Amino acid sequence: MLFDKFQEMAGFQANLADREVKPFGAVTEQILSATTGIVEGKEVILAGTNNYLGLSYDERCIAAAETALRRWGTGTTGSRLANGSFAEHEALEREIADFYGLNHAIVFSTGFSATMGMCATLAGPGDTILLDADSHASIYAGVNLSGANILRFKHNNPDDLAKRLRRLGDDTKRTLIIAEGIYSMYGDIAPLQEIAAVKREYGGYLFLDEAHSMGCLGASGRGAAQAAGVEDDIDFYAGTFSKSLGSIGGFCVSRHAELEAIRFCIRAYIFTASSSPSVIASTREALRIIRAEPERQDKLWSNAHRLYDGLKALGLPVGPAASPVIAVEMADHSATIDCWKALFDGGVYVNLVVPPASPSTNYLLRNSVSAAHTTEQIDTIIRAYAALVDAGLAKTEQAA
Ligand code: PMP
């Protein structure tokens, strides 16, 4: 039967319904601020939003979007190649390229289409793609469409990357290496100095997805490559507007003039409508704010350290270092759901992550920190986790 393969998912959903939890698709009925909302009838602290700099609810971004809405209307009703290239799109492309100190940029309608579209197009039959094994689903979706020879290197392992590049010999001239800045589920950061050194030694082109690191890392918020001091080694940056910039859309920025020709070969760019100008206008304003207010990044990291230290002090299994994304590993599927529900009932909304969204077979509670969280909110989140530990719901490292 066509639908047999969905039986397992249907069972999983029925189990959630029996337990009266709605971790996937919980409905936000009202947004009260960048960090609070009413979800499924309950006022909660939002601790799973990727709204790293708190800009989704910034008055200046809202005003920019309102003005653009009046000026340009609700949508472009067409692809960038047809009727959908408005002055706003071109301005954002110039501004995002300038933000990276580079000359070439493409703006996409979502972050997913940016990474998928670029990965599907940059390498093709006869080329090789070497990607980090824990790459995001959008990267996998793209490379699977590319027709290239696909190889994976072990997550965040430059030695494994070097070994595979060495085997490729002269073919590295036709090889695209793909990594991310901050990884989306565990919040760990790619060892970019080592990865860049390997690329320098063996060759290849380096594509870096800064979706979770733009705005969070680097002296001017460009991301993990800036923080690692290896920007000269990056051939293509991809990223999204849906996290630090608080809107929706994606981009690719490059030093290579060929990006202008590549633009016309990306199906996820050609055959889809361009973003609404109001979305582009709020993104432009958010980009301006990131440049003008670097202190937001400082607040983000002080919140990240506070939450990380608090969860670690409780003995919870968190990663090796503080990050704007902090994942807590759970014992099993059932405990994850119970903990998620207990946190929600305690007024804290986090992400529940199950395989395959989690890169391993692990179940996770994924927290994302915002510069807009107050110290009191961070402490409330820690207290909600402490209640899980006290109730024996969450495993601790001592107990594990
Ligand atoms: N790349 C990575 C690493 C991501 O985590 C995501 C989304 N979580 C995307 C790309 C896609 O971005 P968007 O959700 O803005 O489409």
Image: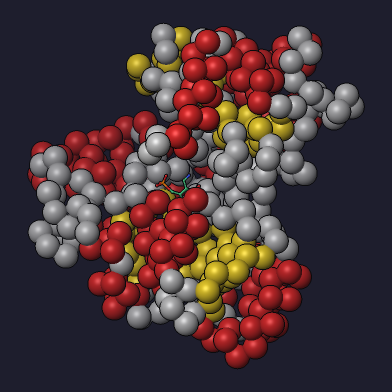
Query: At 10% across and 42% down in the image, what residue appears?
Result: 73
- Residue 262 falls in which quadrant of the image? bottom left
Query: At 62% across and 61% down in the image, what residue appears?
Result: 132
Residue 174 falls left or right of residue 328: left
Q: How many marks?
A: 0
User: Is residue 26 visible to us here?
Assistant: yes
Q: Is residue 255 above or below residue 99?
A: below
- Residue 169 falls in which quadrant of the image? bottom right
Q: How is the image coloured?
A: secondary structure
Q: Is residue 160 above or below residue 25?
A: below
Residue 364 falls left or right of residue 142: right
Pick out the residue farthest to the front. Answer: 1
Q: Position of residue 226 (x, y in %)?
A: 57, 63
Q: Where is residue 70 in the image (x, y as percent from the top left)?
A: 11, 39
Query: At 53% across and 52% down in the image, what residue appears?
Result: 136
- Residue 341 falls in which quadrant of the image? top right
Judge by depth and name the residue closer to the eye, 295 or 218: 218
User: Is residue 99 visible to us here?
Assistant: no
Q: Position of residue 60 (x, y in %)?
A: 31, 37
Q: In this view, does 266 lie above or below 295?
A: below
Residue 95 falls left or right of residue 49: left
Judge by depth and name the residue closer to the eye, 145 or 47: 145
Query: At 68% across and 40% down in the image, what residue appears?
Result: 361
Q: Where is residue 314 in the image (x, y as percent from the top left)?
A: 80, 23
Pick out the residue farthest to the bottom. Answer: 170
Pick out the residue farthest to the right. Answer: 398
Quadrant in the picture for the N terminus? top left
